[in-house]
Image (cartoon, helix red, strand yellow):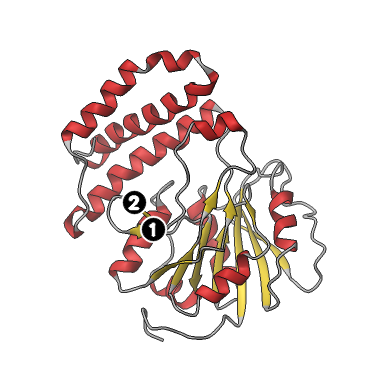
Amino acid sequence: MRTGEVRDRAPERISVVIPVRDAGATLCDQLDALAGQTYTGAWEIVIADNGSTDGATTGVPWDRADVPLRVVDASQRAGSSYARNRGAAEAEGDFLVFCDADDVVVPGWLDAMAAAARNYDAVTGPQEASVINAPDVQRWRPPRATVLQRGGFLPFAPSCNLGVWADVYQRTHGFDEAYPQAHDVEWSWRAQLEGCTLGFAENAVVHYRYRSTIRGVARQAYMSGVDSARLYRDYRSRGMKRPRLVRSMRVWLWLVARSPYLASRAQRGIWVRRAGEAWGRLRGSAKFRVVFF
């Protein structure tokens, strides 16, 4: 079937792919949520272990005999993009659904994904952050998007909540493993530029877990900033615009003016997140020889 055509059929078998690296503290919550899925079609779970050292994938508890669960070795290369590609390569379904080991899907998640798959090459849904995150951690970030998100260019599907037909994933060669953070944005843009359609299933909700430590927030924001510059390098010729200089200056002025935030637990994460992303953009600009501040 050609990319972009309406299939008007449900998947014959869904493969849920979960990259895992030292997620022993949260994986069981996600598996409990998956065990409670109301979807009645055929499906499986493929856990791609990206080199866990905490025993996260040893003796994985799973009590649904009607749904196979397999753990595959994805430790040859570090990175969630590699783990996702490895899990997809081992999957047997004609429709792949990606989620993360530290989030929690709602009971009708697979139902919503399968229904939307009839009309699109790839599908995503809302990320809800108020259920599994502490109030102060929620305040560190803006509200999660409740519609199809845009990453400064085209819409994108976060890899924590992405469904895609397996043949489309294969034709687009999966995630670009050079992107440690924004591989989902890059894949979404590349797929759409190749003619793929991206839909939004409003009932395919994932309870999204934020980084809850300052170090985790800083690292994620920094990597996001670096990958933003990488995206600009790769997609400026296709129409991606860089931020206006005045906007960039406002970010740095804001960081100086709001430096007292560092003294407050409730506000520290806000400052660290914005500083980490700004620093990442600077480093990325130097690394990829672009101007993307």
Left or right: 136 in relation to 68: left
Residue 31: percent from left, percent from top: 72, 56
For the residues bearing labels 2 and 1, Cβ distance under 8 angstroms: yes
Vertical order, 190 against 257 (above or below): below
Total numbered labels placed on residues in the image = 2
Residue 202: percent from left, percent from top: 51, 63
Mark 1: amino acid = Phe
User: In which quadrant will I find the C terminus?
Assistant: top left
Mark 1 or mark 2, which is nearer the start of the sequence?
Answer: 2
The residue depicted at 62 percent of the width and 68 percent of the height is 110
The residue depicted at 25 percent of the width and 42 percent of the height is 288
Helix, strand or loop at label 2? It is: loop
Residue topped by disc 1: 156
Pick whichever, 14 or 120, lies toward us.
120
Helix, strand or loop at label 1? It is: strand
The residue depicted at 57 percent of the width and 80 percent of the height is 11
Q: Please say whether residue 177 is visible from this viewpoint.
A: no
The residues bearing labels 2 and 1 have C-alpha atoms spaced at a distance of 7 Å
User: In which quadrant will I find the N terminus?
Assistant: bottom left
Q: Please say whether residue 213 is visible from this viewpoint.
A: yes
Residue topped by disc 2: 151
Residue 64 falls in which quadrant of the image? bottom right
Residue 140: percent from left, percent from top: 49, 31
Q: Residues within 10 Å of mark 1 (few under 14, many from 20)?
A: many
Mark 2: amino acid = Gly
Vertical order, 95 against 282 (above or below): below
Q: Residues within 10 Å of mark 2 (few under 14, many from 20)?
A: some
Residue 12 falls in which quadrant of the image? bottom right
Label of residue 57 in the image: none
